[in-house]
Amino acid sequence: MTVADLAGRLLADLGVGHAFGVVGSGNFHLTNALRAHGVPFTAARHEGGAASMADGYSRLSPLPAVLTTHQGCGLTNAVTGIAEAAKSRTPMLVLTADTAGSAVRSNFRIDQDALVASVGAVPERVYGASSAVADLTRAWRTAVHGRRTVVVSLPLDVQAEAVGDVRWTRPAAPAPVRPGSAAVEAFAALLAAAERPVFIAGRGARGAGPAVSALAARTGALLATSAVANGLFAGEEFDLGISGGFSSPLTAELIGGADLVVGWGCALNMWTTRHGSLLAPGAKLVQVDDDASALGAHRPVDLGVHGDCVTAAADVLAASGDGSRTGYRLPEVSARLAERRWWNQTPTPDLSTPDRIDPRVLSVELDRILPAERVVAIDSGNFMGYPSAYLRVPDEYGFCFTQAFQSVGLGLASGIGAALARPDRLGVVATGDGGFLMGVSELETAVRLARPLLIAVYDDAAYGAEIHHFGPAADLDAVTFPDSDLAAIARGHGARGVTVRTPADLAEVASWSRSPEGVMVVDAKVADDGGSWWLAEAFKGH
């Protein structure tokens, strides 16, 4: 058994869900070792696409994905996707080949560890046959238990080393971080004094929904999420949806009226708080996180609670007494939420023209047409607020939001990975024409996989964010393009394609969605929205 063989066998045993990559000579044996030990593998058309597939899969699966790359250029091709995963704290492993220590003049030689560290991922490497089990186990533990994106370099000469008889054990999961009693008591006191509390749950609270909901019910708190945790409180009577730039007018009003805001595994950053403008000036802020360095990192807080969200919610519930308080859960608030909770229920002007559909009208229709059991992946661009706010998801594992690095072009690939992680749901990708064309090489991958996938392209024939950011007085020739027949491009790849200019053009999509098969690309020619409602807030940070 070689080190390459060992890597596949060990990681399959420790637990990885899927592997993605573009196979070259450097990662050929690594990839085949994973496959030989039962890890499913998807061959992408570009390492950047493979990285985003692995990221999308890892966000929605209980087991992390593995990305494999060739040394040097294979890794550099994947760096943007790795950076997005690292900035999102996606638990993901990258196995990348590296040049042999003696190959100092190899054209593939770069400082891979420095490159990886520069984008926020954790560099690791396998040093030799004698340390391979320890090296790989350490990397797996950091990825899974530390919620980090870890890149493991395996030099070619090390991969080929023979390994003797080796044994290993799966590392035990660390115990949840229990908050201190003083913090629990202070938190309970703030809740007891609050008249209008609001809980905002982020990525760190995924899986903690029932515990946080129970405390909210006891203390009269309304419930909201950051964008990445969209769907966490789906079905709750007092669910406000997404807090921040994508908030509906009613959601923004209710969050703005809170006298206590609690972030559960949530950074309370500029996106979630609209640069702080969403919060009332006198509102108290509490932040709960099992990473002490996250407390107060984006905004000053009145109380930082270092603890796991489930444990903290249970401890504060136990300290909150037996009686329930009405708090913000008033009958009139419930009635208003039932009527105008979502953007879908909020009247807006129809900007449609005879040959261009209002993106809000498009989004409302897609939400109505598509099955409720869906997993939605969002690319970046001016359009992104529409599918994020209008396309409902069944829970926090139905939404893949790759926006930590704000790179256009990751949506299609991350959507493929997300759909593979949730094969029980219809995969839905929302992208702009710029992002679709940037990542179009992976359309062939989607077609080859032969799984149902809907790709909705909000097509304004431009990089819309730049147009609306710089305005009509600027020279916009560099960010506007001739209209493209994206439906024809889709058909050329073996997918179904339909051009949508009016709601009536969605009839073919409705027919397909009743029994979806294969890939459907919707080239929606969207009307100019003058800059989406969330864009002005977003650009305040640029």
Image (cartoon, grey):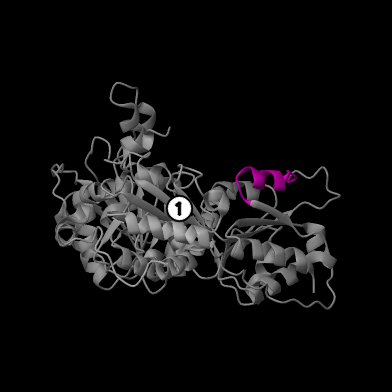
Q: Is residue 387 visible?
A: yes
Query: Position of 38 compared to 205: left or right?
Result: right
Residue displayed at 61% across by 77% down:
38
Q: Position of residue 62 (x, y in %)?
A: 51, 70
Q: Nearer the viewer, residue 247 or 97?
A: 247
Is residue 426 visible in the rendered image? The answer is: no
Q: Nearer the viewer, residue 14 or 249?
A: 249
State the residue at coordinates (70%, 44%).
114
* Residue picked out by circle 1: 287
Which quarter shows the N terminus? bottom right
In the image: residue 161, left or right of residue 468: right
- Mark 1: give few (<14), some (14-19) or many (20+) Cα within 10 Å: many
- Disc tally is 1
User: In which quadrant will I find the C terminus?
Assistant: top left
Q: Secondary structure at mark 1?
A: strand
Relative placement, left or right, of 286 versus 133 is left
Residue at position x 23%, y 47% from top? Answer: 253
Q: Position of residue 3 (x, y in %)?
A: 78, 67
Query: In the picture, residue 220 is in which quadrant?
Result: bottom left
| Whole-percent x, y for residue 166 in the image | 80, 76
Q: Is residue 191 above or below residue 359?
A: below
Residues rendered magenta in the picture: 108-121
Front in this rendered view, residue 373 or 356? 373
Please state which amino acid type lies under the numbered disc 1: Gln
